[in-house]
Amino acid sequence: MVDISSYSSPGGRAYNEDSAALWEEGARQCVIVADGLGGHGGGQIASSTAAELLTQAFAQAEHIDMAWIQEVYEEVNRRVLDCQTGECRMKTTCVSLFVEEGQALWAHLGDSRLYHFVDGQLSFFTTDHSVSQMAVLSGEITREQIRFHEDRNRVLRAFGAEEQVKPDMDGANLQDGAFHAFLLCSDGFWEYVLEGEMEIDLAKAGTAAEWISLMTERLEKKVDGRNDNYTAAAMFFAAGEPGGGVPA
């Protein structure tokens, strides 16, 4: 059983610079979330460029590995740099998940995150490339305090930020009989939805779309109407049928 879904909203902003892309064919799936930076529409161009190119590259690839991800990320970075002008130095964060024959690989730049849940429990989530994450590493703040840190929006890696791009990459075997759930989201989403709340809503959800809907309801109760764009994409992967978020 594989189930994927996504949702994106401008939040309290006039336009949405986030992008999400889903692709599935046979035993291959990919999920992309990108959060554009640059304003005046430039961020939307950068994020949609990244999402579209990564999806197209995966659809055309005969086989993927981390070397393939590095190569594709370098090509996307060149394309975003080519889109920049003197007036608009557009950039985009990005998090991507690629699944091939039950093997998952993921990569990210910036503060768009991937969360991996195994049998309903949070197993892993990515480390932000941001000034506030550096404050965590230096002991100035805790990881939980990133959500409210004054430098949280200052990202250190992104497509279009510099000539060389260095994504963090990892992966997992999904053919272990467990129920795997992935959440990919922009910072405008995870800022308001806590990790414990993600687990609670996962236990209630029978589909990826329902999980996103439950978390979005939480988010919308917390915001003041001036919040950033927010985007989430989810994948359920399991051998059996879903039941209350976790296969029986």
Image (cartoon, rainbow, N blue to C red):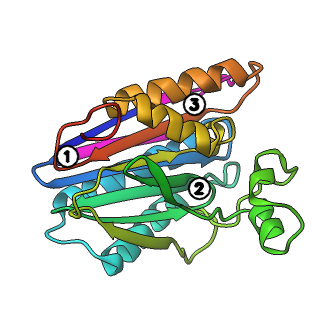
The span picked out in magenta is 8-23
Q: Nearer the viewer, residue 68 or 124?
A: 124
- Residue 242 drawn at (x, y percent): 25, 36
Residue at left offset 57%, top offset 44%: 186
- The N terminus: image quadrant: top left
Residue at left offset 22%, top offset 58%: 177
Residue 56 is drawn in which quadrant? bottom left
Distance from disc 3 to disc 1, alpha carbons, whole Å, reads 25 Å
Left or right: 225 with respect to 176? right
Magenta stretch: residue 10 in it?
A: yes
Disc sitting over residue 84 in the figure: 2
- The C terminus: image quadrant: top left
Which structural element holds mark 2?
loop
Which structural element holds mark 1?
strand
Left or right: 35 with respect to 23? right
Which structural element holds mark 3?
loop
Residue 165 is drawn in which quadrant? bottom right
- Residue 140 drawn at (x, y percent): 90, 67
Disc sitting over residue 16 in the figure: 3
Left or right: 190 with respect to 182? right
- Residue 39 drawn at (x, y percent): 68, 40
